[in-house]
Image: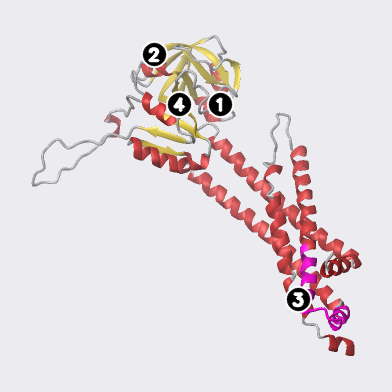
Amino acid sequence: MPFEIRVAIRYLASSGMQTLLILTGVAVGIVAYTFMAALINGLEVRLTDDVIGSIAHVTLEPPEEQPRQLMSDGPFDTLLAVQRSNERRAKLAGWRPLVTRIESMGEVLSIAPQVEGNGFFQRGEKVMPVGINGLAPGRESAIIDLAGGLVRGTVSLAPGDVLIGVTLADELGVTTGQRLRLTSERGRERTLTVRGIFDVGRASVNERLAFVELRTAQSLLELEGNITGIALKMRDIYGAPELARSLAASTGLEAKDWIGENQRLQSALRSQGTTGTLIKFFSLLTILIGVASVLLLAAVRRRAEIGIMRSMGVGRASIRRIFQIQGLLLGLFGSGLGAFGGWLFCVLLLTLTRQPDGSTALPVDPALGEYGTAVALATGASVFAAILPARAAAKVDPVEVIQQ
């Protein structure tokens, strides 16, 4: 074992209580660091899942038709007034080859051609407004996991079937196998059989959406053969803006991504991330100050020993390395203990806050504690903190120490 390492270990071992206290301080700082990382990262994952769990990552829609000027250009300026309620409905024809092409892209996880509109259910004297969503057979759970949230019945849709949420089913007083009359915004009516009832954990879906087979929706909304949009989910959700731009340029359609449509969520996540970064920074700063102060004190207390080693031919570089090795050992072992303690703390919180339905009150994810990063940063901070004490120790003049 090199001389500098043996001396560094002896110094730490001879000041047992002091070494134990600084190791504890480093460990506590890393527990705070890893807990904040697990909390902030877990909260980001939960919020993102809550928002995008039942929406498309990218949505393609036909562009709005702009009114054309029929009169030829003249010496006068023409002013056009557009009444939006009189605009022609945007629809997408010839969509099947496009769906096939997009589905073959490696970054696309699932895709669903959709028909969306409005209508209302009528059952006796009860009238409930709903959003009509037409889905292609076999793609019922492509965007919203209806199969995973199924409470009763089945998600397989045939013409004349409808899937509704638990809240809407309770309000209408129906269950699977019963029939409902659906009237669309175009005035067309259809009696449908409740094929399945779902609970996807999102009130807006459970209360106000009705899913029917694609051809049924096209008939109700007078869109025979056409659709109103294409929804898709990606393997990498944060690649949605880039894919949306690419698809908009190649197809000429209007492409919307979930990030652009949820700016408030992004702002909230950035604010939470900044808060977590500040807390982690101060945790590392505490470690740096603690290690530096302990090693500075050690350099003062061991002036006589350092002077003797210097008089025996030990160079200034070796003295500096002795103190930097002490900083390395304190940071490495203290942060390792802190990382393990942080993981145990997160697991304990997760266990104590787990609710009967399996969810947790705190969005702590022990797997997202950034333990390796914490150990690396704390060790680096400890080595950096040892620079000043190492320089102070290396400046000890052996002649002055011996004379004292």
Residue 234 as seen in the image, left or right of residue 82: right
Rendered location of residue 358, percent (x, y): 71, 31
Between the C-alphas of marks 3 and 2, the distance is 89 Å
Which residue position is annotated with label 1? Answer: 145
Viewer-proximal residue among 152 and 386: 386
Q: Quadrant of the C terminus?
A: bottom right
Viewer-proximal residue among 257 and 244: 244
Which residue position is annotated with label 4? Answer: 112
Q: Type of residue at label 2?
A: Glu
- For numbered disc 1, what is the local secondary structure? loop
Position above or below: 230 against 22: above
Q: Type of residue at label 4?
A: Ala
At 70% from the left edge and 62% from the top edge, which residue is drawn?
380
Q: Earlier in the sequence, mark 3 or mark 2?
A: 2
Which residue position is annotated with label 2? Answer: 189
Q: Type of residue at label 1?
A: Asp
